[in-house]
Image (cartoon, grey):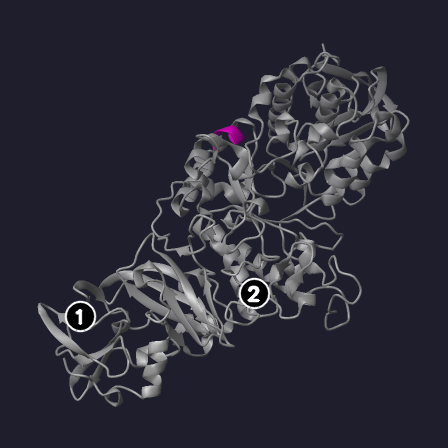
Amino acid sequence: MAQIDPHDIADPAVLSRIAEGRFDDPFAVLGPHPRGGTRHVTAFDPGAQEMAAMAGRKAHPLDPVEGYPGLFHGKVPGAEPYLLRGRRDGEEWLVEDAYRFGPVLGELDEYLLGEGRHHGLWQALGAHVIEHQGTAGTHFAVWAPNARRVSLIGDFNAWDGRRHVMRRRGATGVWEIFMPGLGEGTAYKYEILGAYGGLAQKADPVGFGAQHPPATASVVRDIAGYGWSDHGWMGMRAEAQRIDRPISIYEVHLGSWRRKDGGRPISYREAAVELVDYAKDMGFTHIELLPISEYPFDGSWGYQPVGLFAPTIRFGPPHEFRDLVNAAHKAGLGVILDWVPGHFPTDPHGLVQFDGTALYEHADPREGFHQDWNTLIYNYGRAEVMNYLAANALYWLREYHLDGLRVDAVASMLYRDYSRAEGQWVPNKDGGRENYEAIAMLQAMNRLTYGEEPGIMTVAEESTSYPRVSRPVHEGGLGFGFKWNMGWMNDTLDYIKREPIHRKHHHHQMTFGLHYAFSENFILPISHDEVVHGKGSMLAKMPGSEWEKFANLRAYYGFMWGHPGKKLLFMGQEFAQRAEWNHDAEIDWACIGNPLHYGMQLLVRDLNAIYRATPALYTHDCDGAGFQWIEADDAAHSIYAWVRRGGPGDAEVVVVCNFTPVERSGWRMGFPQPGLWREVLNSDAEVYGGAGRGNLGRVTALPGESHGQPAHADLVLPPLSTLIFIKDDRTTS
């Protein structure tokens, strides 16, 4: 076989860079190129001793390029597609030539990517199984603007970054390549020669799948073509998720809700049956999942994600996650996903120093390093990063039909000095602590998601008093639909864990939330954060004897469901799990065999049923028109009472709480109307594990003022109890 003079192909310096994997424009040399009316093909395969181009049934030998092992060149007449046949030591292989294919991304993609305004970012970047120029394969594209070279690597090329260097797309910073023959299930990474010469192997920031941890490669997943059958839910979702509708959320960590076969976590498909059936039976309206975007460390519970576009493989591939969402929708349940745009981990296969520079993060650790979590903070002021995050939010809602996103750790994003001492943070342009860029990103995300996917909800976990979190962007708000009421949660839990004899000194902790209850669209959250890190379970927080602990918790849940605001409980809390949550084991289902635990589960089921069936308990959750105190100041007896009202014609509700272990008989209480009031819930009922004290299912309010109300009734208030009464228009006889 003749040797080819390298000068006949390209500058020898270019050929050296190709052979060393340092050339950033391989399509200019490799692949087919016309010369003198004949097609010439140059190929690079460092594992080959011989190479030929197979066009039709004819082999066209390619000659080695002198001085550059692995480089071959020759004439391949005609225009029909060809394959490359390599040989070494008697072994032979036949592959497509990736360099004979043209670009996939169009001019509009390139323009929008360059502008940082590609709302369908995942449709351009990532790995897409397609047919291109009549050949099946996968198109790969990644943003790495400061890289000197980006290669696709995997088993298909022995993880050799010299073999498939990608095409740079001008000033956009995007690199792409179409790989014929690759498809679903292919593991891959990008090998990046960084801006300053270092080599790194990175997972795909827009990859749709990943290997099982601790392996770290991305995996090609074809996410097109799922057969959704949730049209009924999608058509009614906007109505079901309004602020004047009942919303009761069951928060779930899939890895520890149930375990199977000796300890493995439940799968998406198993959850599509078991979790959906359970949440529906318990009367919840929504399931909220702790983050499922791919994450490397189980102990982070998903809150340190690496693959923002990949449902974690721990529970199954992407279509099986869709099976879970589809099943929930067919059961009339919404699905909310915890979304984490506040930070990302420093794992070397992730976003850190992605192209050899601080690309996704800030270079200055005073802006870019999270001291609390040893993670990195996104550079929200960079248009492409803002686009990456906003498009990711839209991706989950559109591709997986999710009904909402609960945004984690919003407070950490809003303030530049969050958890930092003086001198450890960089002020904004006006010298203040607000993070203008993060605020703009959150507003952009909310505008995009609400604009593109009507009927969805976004929820902020925001622990400060930052104003107008759940108000529209055009009104100066952040644009969220709801906000977790962290103040209410902290105050009321601090109260209920106290011995009843001391509660009179902290009476205001249960009433203070009403001073601001309607300043935002609040969700009342008793989340996973309240039952970890030594905080104990909800039951363990309660004071007193065994019976009193359960009675306190039942009364507290009654208080919560009667209080304005949407509801959220973390798994296990609905049956008063004794131990605090352990993410490495399933929740303690066995304890439901104990009547007290089973009674708690029945109570939560009934609270959900009453809440959903009673407009007065939800219509004005987010505005003050539906709330009036009856008794807010009886600190000596730790008694609270209030009225909830719905729309015109809806029956009024009275809620009464006794947070002492003393029964109050003949206790006069004001009522907003005379007549019959049904006692629809008594947390001391025997079926819930109580002693069965109460008002025999109803009371009659008589005309005559009490507590500022036009009627009154003498009640039995069981110890440590909540009672809920609904006005009944039937006669009192």
> Which residue does the numbered mark 1 point to in the structure image?
81
At 69% from the left and 31% from the top, the residue drawn is 538
Image quadrant holding the N terminus, namely bottom left
At 70% from the left and 18% from the top, the residue drawn is 678
Q: Is residue 201 above or below residue 711?
A: below
Would you identify the image quadrant in which residue 13 lies?
Answer: bottom left
Q: Position of residue 148 (x, y in %)?
A: 45, 77
Q: Position of residue 469 (x, y in %)?
A: 68, 54
Q: For this rendering, which residue is in front, 371 or 518?
A: 371
Q: Is residue 110 left or right of residue 692?
A: left
Q: Is 279 part of what is drawn in magenta?
A: yes
Dominant secondary structure (helix, strand or loop) of the stretch shown in magenta: helix
Residue type marked 2: Met
Q: From where the camera sits, is residue 724 visible?
A: no
Q: Secondary structure at mark 2?
A: helix
Q: Is residue 460 left or right of residue 449?
A: right
Instruction: Mark 2 vs mark 1: give the one in front.
Output: 1
Q: Which residues are magenta?
A: 276-280
The circle drawn on residue 386 is 2
Q: Position of residue 308 (x, y in %)?
A: 50, 55
